[in-house]
Image (cartoon, helix red, strand yellow):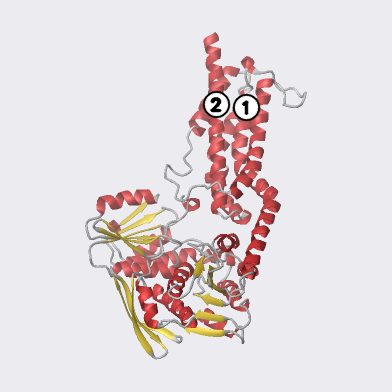
């Protein structure tokens, strides 16, 4: 009999270890989601509601509590305590012994324990441990810890399995909600930390009165345009620019505080926005002397609400220019063109493929990149770049417009442009062995997606393959734009289409089928890793593979 009791004791220990592991991994998962949502409570809350049944209150939580209820209220007189322990422990091991929220795939962007994440994790861990500690200690001690309130006499000198099971499952279920409390608790601390770095950045910029600040905004193309401007200006000036997609208040402050030095003559800042007022926040840190607006599209339409709201927000960068500032605008975009009238004291330079003082013609592209003729002040200059796509030609025209304000000659610009490398994950042409890869994995948008498919269709070196999960954050237009994207894919005469995500790619699939594209050339998979497995079997020397967008783990459902 002692052996039997020892087995029961061991089973209880295994139960606690299994639940502790699952609760820990679940907590880490929700911290990861919160970080990927930019620590924004509103966006995290939206994700919680969207994934309520799949990730928040899962079928395992509901069914396990149902079993506890059935055992406790309908079978308590017929089932022994040890039988209840065996039953509930085995169900817990079966349901909570594994953790596959990432579906067994590698995380694309793992959780990073930054200083902010550490500050958040401390109260989060404390809140998360309260219930498991109270129920585990209480069940084993026979009373609620720190009180004299008795509980049911410990079973077999061990834990009360009903208290233990319900407490741990409830604690596991509550993990996503403790983040709200931890975030609200640390919000005043984060506000003070942010203000400290903002004040530091303002002071540093103010100490450099000769510094020229260039601010770039737009729905798409900000990062590519920023690097083009940097590379053209570096022919004659000392330039500091934000790396990658650093376009938030803290990202800008980090660059100013850590990278900006006394010898720099020009500071180039990318200014991003997801909500109205975001550009104002950035201009409160540092006001630009030169504003560049790439376009007004429908990126982040879900958070802005309308394209007019996006236009208002982007136009803020022109309104907030320093006195007698300058603006380089995409005149092909009507909403951007209207910004030219916002300030009488601002010198405006319009560029475009169709309208503006600076234009391009005779655009060609292939495996070597893109070539075009630049038209500026009656002059014509040949440009050849390693970049792909007509939208990159427009980005280059914006960069040329800024370079012109600094009196850089067109021929000098052309030499610099020929040496510019593609921005990582933005129509980046690579060669992997005998196969070409067009990496356009970063933040796909309707215009960029169509351009990428058009570019792919013009490659003649081998078979043409596209891998895509479609586009996100387009609000009410998301389904329509993905269907239109599918139509573009269907008309492109590709050899293999791989859609990632069965549910979210349905509009793309509908668009593809509407064009009469052969169904046997379309594959739908659950993850990027499965798509890569198919490509490895399918691809031959000379084939071209386009990776169009790569959603973060928050969308990997």
Q: Is residue 93 above or below residue 196?
A: above
- Asked whether the viewer can see residue 491, the reply is no
- Asked whether the viewer can see residue 8, the reply is yes
Q: Nearer the viewer, residue 310 or 385?
A: 385
Specify the label residue 15 is tagged with: 2
Which quarter of the figure has residue 428? Answer: bottom left
Image position, residue 552 (x, y; %): 47, 54
Image position, residue 71 (x, y; %): 60, 25
Q: Are marks 2 and 1 in contact (CB under 8 Å)?
A: yes
| Residue for point 54% across, 62% down | 259
Residue sticking out furthest to the front: 263
Q: Is residue 376 above or below residue 206?
A: below
Specify the label residue 164 is tagged with: 1
Q: Earlier in the sequence, mark 2 or mark 1?
A: 2
Q: Nearer the viewer, residue 428 or 137?
A: 428
Q: Is residue 308 left or right of residue 223?
A: right
Which quarter of the figure has residue 170? Answer: top right
Q: Is residue 273 left or right of residue 410?
A: right
Structural distance between the alpha carbons of marks 2 and 1: 9 Å
């Amino acid at each position: 009999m002692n052996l039997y009791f020892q087995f029961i004791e061991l089973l209880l220990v295994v139960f606690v270890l299994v639940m502790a592991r699952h609760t820990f991994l679940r907590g880490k998962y929700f911290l990861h989601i919160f970080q990927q949502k930019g620590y924004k409570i509103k966006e995290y809350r939206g994700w919680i509601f969207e994934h309520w049944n799949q990730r928040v209150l899962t079928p395992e939580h509901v069914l396990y509590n149902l079993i506890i209820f059935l055992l406790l209220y309908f079978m308590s007189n017929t089932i022994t305590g040890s039988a209840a322990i065996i039953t509930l422990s085995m169900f817990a091991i079966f349901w909570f012994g594994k953790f596959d929220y990432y579906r067994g795939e590698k995380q694309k962007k793992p959780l990073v324990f930054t200083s902010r994440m550490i500050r958040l994790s401390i109260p989060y861990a404390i809140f998360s441990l309260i219930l498991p500690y109270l129920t585990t200690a209480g069940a084993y001690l026979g009373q609620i810890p720190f009180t004299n309130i008795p509980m049911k006499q410990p079973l077999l000198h061990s834990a009360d399995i009903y208290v233990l099971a319900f407490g741990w499952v409830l604690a596991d279920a509550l993990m996503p909600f403790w983040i709200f409390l931890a975030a609200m608790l640390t919000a005043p601390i984060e506000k003070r930390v942010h203000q400290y770095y903002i004040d530091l950045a303002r002071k540093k910029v103010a100490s450099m009165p000769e510094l020229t600040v260039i601010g770039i905004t737009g729905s798409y193309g900000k990062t590519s345009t920023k690097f083009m401007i940097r590379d053209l200006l570096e022919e004659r000036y000392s330039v500091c620019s934000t790396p990658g997609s650093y376009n938030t208040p803290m990202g800008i402050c980090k660059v100013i505080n850590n990278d900006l030095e006394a010898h720099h003559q020009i500071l180039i800042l990318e200014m991003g926005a997801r909500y109205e007022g975001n550009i104002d926040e950035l201009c409160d840190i540092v006001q630009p002397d030169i504003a560049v607006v790439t376009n007004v599209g429908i990126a982040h339409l879900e958070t802005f609400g309308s394209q007019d709201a996006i236009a208002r927000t982007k136009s803020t960068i022109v309104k907030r220019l320093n006195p007698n500032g300058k603006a380089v605008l995409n005149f092909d975009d009507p909403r951007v063109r209207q910004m030219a009238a916002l300030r009488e004291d601002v010198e405006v330079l319009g560029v475009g493929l169709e309208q503006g003082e600076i234009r391009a013609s005779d655009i060609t592209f292939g495996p070597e990149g893109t070539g075009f003729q630049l038209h500026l002040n009656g002059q014509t200059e040949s440009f050849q770049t390693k970049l792909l796509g007509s939208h990159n030609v427009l980005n280059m025209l914006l960069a040329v417009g800024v370079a012109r304000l600094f009196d850089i000659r067109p021929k000098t610009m052309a030499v610099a442009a020929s040496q510019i490398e593609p921005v990582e994950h933005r129509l980046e042409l690579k060669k992997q062995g005998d196969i070409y890869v067009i990496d356009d994995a970063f933040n796909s948008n309707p215009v960029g997606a169509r351009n990428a498919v058009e570019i792919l269709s013009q490659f003649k070196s081998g078979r043409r393959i596209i891998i895509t999960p479609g586009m996100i954050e387009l609000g009410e237009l998301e389904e329509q734009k993905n269907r239109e994207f599918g139509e573009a894919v269907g008309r492109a005469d590709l050899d293999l289409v791989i859609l990632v995500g069965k549910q979210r790619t349905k509009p793309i699939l509908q668009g593809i089928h509407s064009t009469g594209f052969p169904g046997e050339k379309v594959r739908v998979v659950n993850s990027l890793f499965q798509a890569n497995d198919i490509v490895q079997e399918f691809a031959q020397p000379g084939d071209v593979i386009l990776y169009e967008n790569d959603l973060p783990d928050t969308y990997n459902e």
